[in-house]
Amino acid sequence: MKRRRTGARSLPPAGTQPGGALVGAASRVVARGRTPWREAAFCVVDLELSGLDARSDEIISFGAVPVDNGRVGADRALYGLVRPRRALPEASVLIHGIRMVDLAEAPYVEEAIGPLVEAMTGRVLVAHAARIERAFLGAALRRVGGRLRVPVIDTEVLGRLLMAERGTVPPPFLPLGELVAYLGLPEHRPHHALSDAVTTAQAFLALATHLEEVGTTSVRSMVHASERLTWTGR
């Protein structure tokens, strides 16, 4: 798989801050409301973290792949490392296999986030357990004066919605590995940001295709899938 790996790159010039770019183009997708998902542009993102608390933990790597016209753009995949300001907990190293020495020459988040924001601009964000990605991306953008206001689709929620629509009681939480097993898809190298982004992208396409059969066809319906899941559960 060809992929771009980010190095020391500068953020966009003044007046085109990452947060502003995201607010602009991506929000226009939401404004159309009923845009069929096959006609929308998506960016599937996975973050590897030092922990799960966005107030104190940090992004240490990210992976992103675009989805256009119902296809994963693997040739435009993006992968980057981020240097943390605190020592990594041992538990983090054991999960991700990323050590402090591996991040010694990586840019800090204020600089590292630039290519990722560029990749996300004008696209609907897709992530698994998206509240985590949203919290950390939001915190990173605030450091450079931006805001995260893109629409977000959560494959974890879509997976549980598909189970409910098929008459199966979904679990309280559906890990990515269990979701792709349910869908009959492979899982690529768990806990590697780019591999997890590719796995999530493939799961998203499968979920979107299956959910079309029960009327979940637009970007808006997927963004608000949690509301439908609540209704279906009743």
Image (spheres, rainbow, N blue to C red):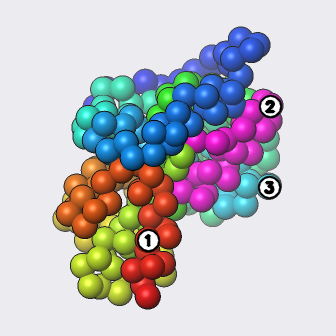
Which residue is painted at 38% across and 73% down in the image?
A: 160
| Rendered image: mark on residue 148 | none
Relative vertical location of residue 17 with respect to residue 231 in this rendering, above or below? above
What is the CA distance from the residue labelled 3 to the residue labelled 1? Answer: 30 Å
- The residue carrying pointer 3 sits among few (fewer than 14), some (14 to 19) or many (20 or more) residues within 10 Å by Cα, namely few
Q: Amino acid at mark 2?
A: Gly
Residue at 26% across, 85% down: 167
- Of residues 27 and 204, the one nearer the viewer is 27
Question: Real-space Cα distance between discs 1 and 2?
Answer: 34 Å
Residue type pointed to by label 1: Arg
Q: Secondary structure at mark 1?
A: helix
Classify residue 141 as left or right of residue 128: right
Q: Which residues are magenta?
A: 130-150
**Badge 2 or badge 3: first in the primary sequence:** 3
Q: Is residue 135 magenta?
A: yes
Residue 151 position in % (x across, y down): 54, 46
Identify the residue under disc 3.
55
Residue identifier under label 1: 228
